[in-house]
């Protein structure tokens, strides 16, 4: 990570490489992508969601693409 940018306080802020960002989809977005019901996504045992709390979860796009191939 590079630290080229300076914030208002004068400290350098790390730059984020866009290639390092993880793209995540909601259950609804994945259901739209696969043209199925959200409940089907919930039942699919091959998918491992990332849970942020008891109600909020996301699926990694890299995992989804691996299943699609």
Image (spheres, rainbow, N blue to C red):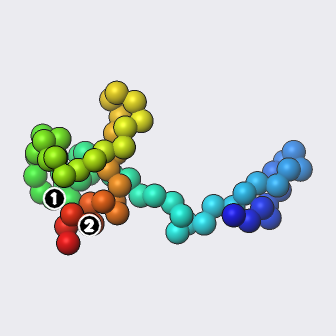
Residue 26 appears in the picture as rendered: no
User: Which quarter of the figure has residue 20?
Assistant: bottom right
Q: Splitting the image into 4 quarters, where does residue 1 fall?
A: bottom right
Q: Residue furthest top?
A: 54
Identify whether 6 is placed above or below 17.
above
Image coordinates for residue 32, horizontal then vertical, percent:
19, 54
Q: Say few, some or many: other residues with alpha carbon within 10 Å of mark 1 (under 14 / 14 to 19 / 20 or more).
A: some
Question: Label for residue 66?
Answer: 2
For residue 5, the mark is none
Mark 1 or mark 2, whichever is nearer to me: 2
Residue sticking out furthest to the right: 10
On the picture, is 67 further left or further right than 37? right
- Residue 53: where, in percent of width, then height? 40, 30
Spatial separation of the CA atoms under disc 1 and disc 2: 14 Å
- Residue 43 seen in render: yes
Q: Residue at x 15, y 59 (%)?
A: 34
What residue is pinned by disc 1?
34
Q: Is residue 13 above or below residue 58?
A: below
Q: Residue at x 28, y 47 (%)?
A: 48
Give the left or right position of residue 29, taking residue 7 as reference: left
Residue 68 in the image, given as x and y percentages of width and height? 19, 67
Helix, strand or loop at label 1? It is helix
In the displayed structure, does residue 22 sit left or right of residue 57? right
Above or below for 3 versus 59: below
Q: Quadrant of residue 51?
A: top left
Question: Mark 2 packing: few (<14 Cα in 10 Å), some, or many (20+)?
Answer: few
> Which quadrant, please, contains the C terminus?
bottom left
Residue at horizontal 80 percent and vertical 64 percent from the top: 4
Give the residue displayed 52% in from the left and 69% down from the top. Answer: 19
Sooner in the amino-acid sequence: mark 1 or mark 2: 1
Residue 69 shown left or right of residue 62 in the figure: left
Q: Secondary structure at mark 2?
A: helix
């Amino acid at each position: 990570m590079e630290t080229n940018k300076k914030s208002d306080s004068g400290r350098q802020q790390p730059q984020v490489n866009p290639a390092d960002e993880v793209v995540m989809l909601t259950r609804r977005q994945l259901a739209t992508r696969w043209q199925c019901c959200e409940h089907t996504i919930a039942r699919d045992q091959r998918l491992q969601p990332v849970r942020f709390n008891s109600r909020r979860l996301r699926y990694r796009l890299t995992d989804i693409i691996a299943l699609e191939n």
